[in-house]
Image (spheres, helix red, strand yellow):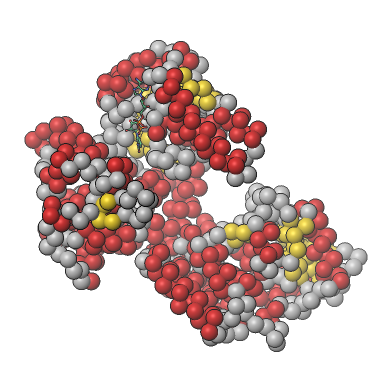
Amino acid sequence: MENFKIDVDADGVALVTFDVPGRTMNTLTASVIREVGEVVERIKTDAAIKGAVITSGKTTGFCAGADLGELGAQAPGGAGGSKEDALRATFDAAFALNKAFRALETCGKPVAAAINGLALGGGLEITLACHYRVVADAPKVQLGLPEAKVGLLPGAGGTQRLPRLMGVMAAAPYLLEGKSMKPAEALAAKVVHEVVAPDQVVEAAKTWVKTKGDPVAPWDKKDFKIPGGGPYTPGGAQVFIMGNAMLRKQTYGNYPAQMNILKAVYEGLQVPIDAALRIESRYFVKTMSSPQAKGMIRTLFLSMQELGKGSGRPAGVPHYDVKKVAVIGAGMMGAGIAYVQAMAGVETILIDTTQEAADKGKGYAQGLVDKAVKRGKMTAEKGAAILALIHPTADYDQVKGSDLVIEAVFENRDIKAEVTKKAEAQLAETAVFGSNTSTLPITGLAKASVRPANFIGIHFFSPVDKMGLVEIILGKETSPETLAKSIDYVLKIKKTPIVVNDSRGFYTSRCFGTFVQEGLEMLAEGIAPAIIDNVGRATGMPRGPLEMNDDVALDLSYKITEQTKKDLGDKYEERPFSPVVEKMVVELGRLGRKNGKGFYDYPTDGGAKRLWPGLSELVPVKTADADQALIEEIRTRLLYRQAVEAARCFEENVVTDPREADVGAILGWGFAPWTGGPISLIDGVGAARFVETCDQLAQKYGARFSPPQILRDMAAKGESFYGRFAAKAKAA
Ligand code: NAD
């Protein structure tokens, strides 16, 4: 065996050490799954073995679960084979694991798991098939089933054993939300039996095998009862009735994984464990074969991982270790950027027009650090060391020696030009100048620079400390070296970079803008605002489009429209909603959430927001009732409008890699995660069907839905985005 080592001690306890060669962390690869069967066979048939302890040979953890790369390739529609073949292969693989773990559980000898590090997904599930679990008491140890987070179902017994151990209600957040537990929580929930010092886990597990070793799982005993009752008991039934409603409220039925997990638990808990595991495997395959699972695994796991390693970085440029960065503009964005830099150990010069304004910017980091220290998440010394890295000042001389500058002053070309000149006067020839502009084209801003090759867009999202994405924008003259250095910087501050070409609104703001605008179009058409936002939320977007308008601020939308009007001149097309927004902003002073009144009223006492009653006078409602067909159409319009814009960005070479387009959409503006991103959405529907629907929408609602040529070509050739642009992804 290449993944397991078995050492039998003098007492006949076999220590099975799980150690996948050549990897820093154990995962359940196909070869591991095959060998689990061999391990079980040896434990069962070797008369010298009285019982076994399973542990990991890695210092990084016990096991991180399935190999999602392998699983993704097996997903029907993935690499190679017919759909039926792939489905059968998926079922066989899923059930093989269940069979192997069940064989371990019923091998007739006591088996204990010595969990010496994190155990996630299949890594936790193998321990649940052991008769006893000992966990190391260490801060990095986590136990959990994160499958639901990437659209999957825990398919190696997790949906059956966890609720049989801790009860359905208690298991629900671990199964449905992918929450993980610390050793102490696991002990309290009776998921594990002992928590001991890290160097004692194997010994404690062996002691149990030798002294108490019981080779029968609780659910294989005659008097077994599910904690809190099964689905057929009054208490248990309540949990499912409520759980179903709550799930519907949270997911709007967009996520097959969560639905299938609940079904697997409900059906599985009514039958003995062997039948239950078959039920689980069936739901596993059903979930795996959904386009949602495929899109989510690819975007939220595989692509995130690749981008997190800097897959778009030009080769051949030496690693650029950014040690000192000047952030100019200590407002909302600059203050957040200073904080994330300091957290990553980067010395930060935080500049504003006055010392007072710069100090206020540092105050933001101070607030976050104080909170972390108060909650015990950070020591006071660590907090002080982080804050000491931020130097607030109004003096540009201090920019000297910076490896990089982030400009985050007002969104105004002249001010940005002035700041560029002042900062560059202090910079070395090799330093990078990054602008955090959200709308102004980079090539234009670079005109103020004496080194346009070093000038680039480094676009953060608000709030900077919570948002994981950074959109890097190339100006016409930006050099590959500057791009490589910028990616190194973004990775150093632990954000995920995507790289796009210059365009109005770049990629993220441009596509996101279509969502909020489509909501305004609907409002102007007379669709009731409540319908627009309810359906908007039901698409899987974080909020409805009108709510989003309020959050972004209506005066900002108004300003951007006015600027666009100026820039486009005759080409600008006035929209029916423009006068509505203008009236709200200019006449009524309704600016959105920021001043407590926009499309909604925001009570000052912090109560729930309510739609502004005056809105119906400003825009008369023509459609107050929505039938299913209208709901479907609103849903399609809101999602397809964004997706067709993303496709247009490919046509115009603004984005060039489907992985960046999908990751950028979900991380940047919260595009419905169940789709795997707008490009996965189009690929899942198929270009031909997508084009057909867009043509129909264009006829009814206008050219904004017209599919770009690239989509028509793909439809004609039966291509997908991921197929067409695969070369780039592979080359990376
Ligand atoms: P803000 O108004 O909160 O902060 C701007 C800061 O720049 C102010 O503190 C101001 O005093 C300072 N400033 C102005 N002129 C200066 C000068 N000459 N030298 C030094 N400091 C100067 O604005 P913000 O929301 O932080 O936005 C800053 C930039 O980031 C803008 O370009 C904006 O488009 C962009 N951006 C904003 C967001 C967002 O959600 N707010 C998101 C991404 C990008």
- Residue 126 found in image quarter: bottom right
Q: Is residue 102 above or below residue 347?
A: below
Residue at screen point 48% across, 15% down: 398
Residue at screen point 60% across, 40% down: 373
Left or right? Give the position of 360 relative to 35: left
Question: Residue 107 at x, y = what percent?
Answer: 74, 77
Left or right? Give the position of 161 relative to 112: left
Q: Is residue 449 above or below residue 543?
A: above
Left or right? Give the position of 65 relative to 107: left
Tell me if residue 277 can be seen: yes
Question: Residue 530 at x, y = what percent?
Answer: 24, 61
Residue at screen point 43% across, 58% down: 296
The image quadrant where one finds the N terminus is bottom right
Question: Residue 309 at x, y = what percent?
Answer: 51, 41
Q: Is residue 547 above or below residue 311?
A: below
Front-most of 23 and 272? 272
**Tally of marks:** 0
Q: Quadrant of ligand 1?
A: top left
Tell me if residue 649 can be seen: no
Residue at screen point 38% across, 45% down: 668
